[in-house]
Each structure stands twice: as C-alpha cells, then as structure tokens.
Image (spheres, rainbow, N blue to C red):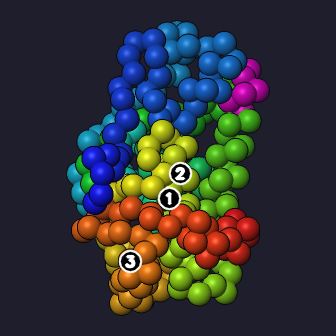
Amino acid sequence: MSGTEQPPRGIADDGDAFHFCSTCAFSAACLESGYDKSQLRDLHVLVEHIGPFHEGEHIFREGDPFTAIAAVRSGTVKTYVTDHEGREHVQGFFLPGEVIGLNAISQARYPSNAVALDSAILCRFSFPNIAALAMRMPGLQQQLFKLLSLDIGKAALLSGNFSADERMAAFLITLSRRYAARGFSPNRFVLTMSRTDIANYLRLAPETVSRVFRRFQDEGLIHVERREIELTDRKQLETLSSDVLRTA
C-alpha cells in the first residue's frame, strides 16, 4: 500500500478506572447524562470484559438464552444462521464499538450465532441492568433506540435487486463509514472477513466477488494487498453505492 499510514487492526484503547474505552458504544450517552465510569460502578452496571475469543470461537449460539448485549472492544465478530440443509447464511459483521445481541430482545433468545473472525474481546452488558439504567438516563435510552435502528438498517441494506458492483461498493463504503465513526482511517482498513464470507453476506458467488475486486482494482477504485484495502476513488464508489445506501 502507498504511504506510511497503517490500516487499523480493530484495537481500542483500554480506558482506565475513570475513563471509558475509546470505542465504547455507550460512553457519550453516559457522560452527557452526568455519569462517569466510577459512578456507574457504584450503580453496579459496569461492563464485564470477556475474551479473548480466538478465530472460530463462538460468543453465543442460536437459541441460547438472552441475558446480555455485548459491544465489540477489539477484533471482528460475524453473525450467521445455518439452515436445515447445513448451509451458512452470514447476517453481518461487527467492528469495535458495535453491539451484538440487540435482535435477541424480543424473543429472549439469540436468533443467530456469533463467532470471532480474529482475536476478539467484548464488553458484556447485563440487559436488565442497562434497561433499568436507561429509565433514568434519557440519553442512554436514545442511544439504545439508535443502535436498534442501525441494526434494522444493516438487515435491510442488501434486500433490493442490485448489481454485484453496487453491492460491493455499498459494502466497502459502509465499512469505511463505520471505521471513520470509530476514529479509524475511512480509506484504509483490513478486511478481517474472508472472501467467501463477503460473498455469502452480499448474496453473491465467491467467484463474482473475486471478479469485482479485480475489476475495481483495474479501474483504480481500490488497491488490495491480501486483506488490506485502500479506497483510491471514493467518489466513484459512493456513486456506485448511492442507490443501495439510500434504501438502508
């Protein structure tokens, strides 16, 4: 890759006894409501750090009882379901600061499997505790609603009749925006998911994903080196993805 900037590896700082981790999904809402980390400890609602989960290890499985949501602290997590014929269907990828388990609230059981794609550490929040805290903190309640809305948006992202180029461009731009929201480079990052997983998620054949990557690189839209990717013509990628992202 050109330049000296290194793509992010999905690592958040640890925070300390008084400060939240840099990617914490709830820190801004808590601070705006006047609660710092030490005060939340007194309320017995501080997070529990779990992991590391190594590549291929499951965080939870479909049907497990739901008691907590979890924010990715470092690494990447994939969610998926398996049908009656044993075929895997990828539902999403979660980066540092993003929350998994929100879709389990209504049924009180996890409706999918969650597996680490690399070494992953998570912050687990007791859902009964955080729901009770949200009753006294409107900012936290609003953040929970926002996270639920984003989760629904991700599920709807690829529901339309879009071309392979449009789907891939939307996938890359969405990843870029998610990394940028967490303080990482929007144009250089590591694809921790395999090409097969990307194809599954985008509802494309693996060979189609490989062809689109090669074509995008030949056209100067991206530069790929193993799993590291650089968006070299962001404007054109945004144009390609505009119809997909408008529906999200």
Position of residue 78 relative to residue 74, above or below, is below
Q: Give how far across and how far down residue 188 sits, in percent.
A: 39, 55
Q: Give how far across and how far down residue 144 sits, in percent.
A: 67, 40
Position of residue 208 relative to residue 137, above or below, is below
Q: Give how far across and how far down residue 79 sits, in percent.
A: 45, 62
Q: Are marks 2 and 1 in contact (CB under 8 Å)?
A: yes
Residue type pointed to by label 2: Arg
Q: Which residues are magenta?
A: 135-141
Do we see residue 108 in this rendering? Answer: no
**Callout 2 secondary element:** helix
| Residue that numbered label 2 is attached to | 178
Position of residue 88 relative to residue 3, above or below, is below
Q: Give how far across and how far down residue 123 sits, in percent.
A: 42, 35
Residue type pointed to by label 1: Leu
| Magenta highlight on residue 214 | no
Q: Quadrant of residue 181?
A: top right
Position of residue 205 relative to residue 159, above or below, is below
Distance from the alpha carbon under mark 1 to that under mark 3: 17 Å
| Residue that numbered label 1 is attached to | 175
**Callout 3 secondary element:** helix
Q: Residues within 10 Å of mark 2 (few under 14, many from 20)?
A: some
Residue type pointed to by label 3: Gln
**Residue under the image location 53 percent in, 22 percent down:** 45
Distance from the alpha carbon under mark 2 to that under mark 3: 22 Å
| Residue that numbered label 3 is attached to | 217
Distance from the alpha carbon under mark 2 to that under mark 1: 5 Å
